[in-house]
Image: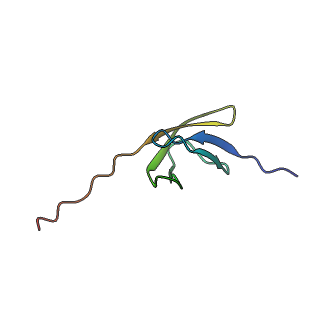
């Protein structure tokens, strides 16, 4: 029995990623550069990943 996996590449550090099944719109972190990535598309077992801009709150301090 084989487990389906998906593959993609981090757009920032170009690390190859192999992931269990994931859905479009889900987010994950690159294990190498720790960038937050969002799955934009899945085609033929390949993920299209885009970085997510994280906006930090300004607490006024």
Given the current orientation, which residue lies at the most extreme top position? 43
Instruction: Tell me if residue 41 comes above or below residue 20 in the rendering.
Output: above
In-front residue for pair 39/18: 18
Instruction: Tell me if residue 6 comes above or below residue 30 in the rendering.
Output: above
Image x and y of residue 19, in percent: 65, 50
- The chosen color scheme is rainbow
Instruction: Tell me if residue 12 comes above or below residue 35 in the rendering.
Output: above
Image x and y of residue 40, in percent: 50, 37
Given the current orientation, which residue lies at the most extreme bottom position? 61
Count of numbered badges drawn on the protein: 0
Residue in view at x 68 percent, y 36 percent: 45
Residue in view at x 56 percent, y 44 percent: 15
Q: Left or right: 27 with respect to 21?
A: left
Q: Quadrant of the C terminus?
A: bottom left
Given the current orientation, which residue lies at the most extreme right position? 1
Residue in view at x 65 percent, y 41 percent: 7
Image x and y of residue 41, in percent: 55, 34
Image x and y of residue 33, in percent: 46, 52
Task: Tell me the quarter of the picture where residue 24 sits.
Answer: top right
Q: Left or right: 14 with respect to 58?
A: right
Task: Tell me the quarter of the picture where residue 23 sits.
Answer: top right
In-front residue for pair 27/30: 30
In-front residue for pair 33/60: 33
């Amino acid at each position: 029995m084989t487990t389906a996996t998906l593959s993609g590449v981090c757009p920032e550090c170009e690390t190859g990623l192999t992931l269990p099944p994931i859905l479009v719109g889900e987010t994950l972190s690159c294990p190498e550069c720790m960038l937050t990535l969002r799955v934009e598309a899945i085609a033929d077992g390949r993920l299209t990943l885009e970085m997510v801009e994280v906006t930090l709150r300004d607490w006024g301090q």
